[in-house]
Amino acid sequence: MRKTPFGANGDGGGGNNAGGAGQAFAARGGRLDTDLNANLDRIRGELAGSPDLVVRKFTLRIAGRLPAAAVYLETVTDKDTVNDFVMRSLMPPYAADAPEAADSPEAAFRYVCDNALAVGHIEMLDDWTSLLLELLTGKTLLLLEGWNQCVCGSTIGGEKRAVSEASTQVVVRGPKDSFSESVATNIALVRRRIRSPKFGFDSLKIGTVTQTTVVMLYIDGIVKDDIRQEVRRRLEKINTDAILESGYIEEFIEDSWYSPFPTVFHTERPDVVAANLLEGRVAIVVDGTPFVLIAPTVLSQFFTAAEDYYQRYDIGTFIRLLRYVAFVISLFGPACYIALTTFHQEMLPTTLLINLSGAREGVPFPAIVEAFLMEISFEILREAGIRMPRAVGQAVSIVGALVLGEAAVQAGIVSPIMVIVVAITAIANFSIPAYNLAITARMLRFLFMLAAGFLGFYGIILGMLMLVAHMNSLRSFGVSFLSPLVPLKYKQLKDAFVRLPHWYADERPDDTAADTSRMPPDQKPRP
């Protein structure tokens, strides 16, 4: 094949003018021309000299040796598919098999569509807007001289990351595959788990420049229609130039942008997406990112890991309750230490109080300043460990924490008890399965530290009341963020804080599911 860069075939120095004209043509669209060379010149102009544009001209031995051309972008196209199922199908001399009626460009076009191309999916296009969009997604265009339509063959490919193990939601027992940056691969991973004819999806193009493919996944008959329509309505309202990651979509569609709590869940595990679809939720897959959004979202989802359902129910319950305890420690640990050592020393046993006073002897700062110094230092270390190269990041975070903590204690800047409190708080924060909720706990921790520094436990209680009131006001696509606690739904509590046996979880959440029955009432396999 011959790659035809911009400026070839007589374009010469007029390339820039052609590019500007191409942008003007793209603005008003229009239909294809019957002149093959005019169509090819316009494609080169519209793509503004893309070096990966390939234009392969050849002659069809139909209708008196009809000129034709195959056009594709080699960086987003499967070149083996183009060679084997497009070019090889058109290049052999199959004129002997062509009907006598194929004596015109239209008849030759119909013959190629019906008999010549060996590609599984083809389309006929006649407008420039659709033609350019399909070309940019990795499809191959076949244009003929004398006809104002083109054939679009599905040859999407290019370099992409293979399916690998999840990096942010690791499990000991369970599937090891995770989503990749290919939307087609991600849909296939979910469809492999949900082999139902009711599994459906809606595809949209969002971003006036990027034209990013965004796909809604749902199970018809389980998801509520008003939730599915609301998700689609919010996606259709997005009007921006670029969508580069699902985080863009999350900010556009979330209910409360001012809240530190995430109201849209994200995951890179196909089994988690499948489980949420079976509960009546909607998944949003964005091309170019392995993180899939799930809506509506409730607070209990952020404390649930996929492995909870693969272990025994008693083990899953214990670990889940442990995560709730870890969240409380991460949120209130330093604040409680500040309140106890500053305002409420009488709550401590005498022996412990004497030990704390001895440990803090010589520390020049009050407890709140001491806590802020240690917490900010640890946050900087954690961020540095994430952003540095993988080979040295872990060593920097561990060695830096040990060296700085020991040096700070030896210098008398902080007390050993404060180092212990900060370390336990950090470890508890790592125990939260959802990274975005862990960041929320890290942010709110500083507010509670301030409240404890000024008012002690009274400030912590006041802040807790404000936090619960705020969480109670949150909604995710019409669903209460604190459901099933607010409003109280006893039957749904069986999978909120504890994980009861699978045979006991016989109903789906009625907040999201139209069909709440998981199994027939007369066929529940009770032991």
Image (cartoon, rainbow, N blue to C red):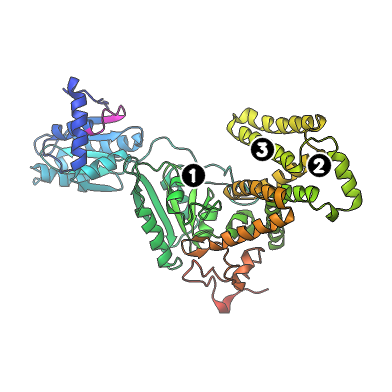
Label 3: how many residues lie within 10 Å, few (<14), some (14-19) or many (20+)? few
What's the CA distance linking mark 2 and mark 3? 17 Å
C-alpha span from label 1 to label 2: 41 Å
Q: Residue furthest front?
A: 454
- Residue 97 at x, y percent in the picture: 16, 43
Query: Is 66 left or right of 426, judged from the image as shown?
Result: left
Q: Earlier in the sequence, mark 1 or mark 2?
A: 1
Residue 325 visible in rendering: yes
Along the line of sight, which residue is nearer the eye, 228 or 355? 355
Give the mark nearest the N terminus, 2 or 3.
3
Question: Identity of the amino acid at label 3?
Answer: Ile
Q: Amino acid at mark 1?
A: Pro
Q: Looking at the image, can residue 58 be seen?
A: no
The location of residue 425, given as percent across then percent down, is 72, 46
Which structural element holds mark 1? loop
Give the labeled residue for mark 1.
Answer: 290
260 vs 53, nearest the viewer = 260
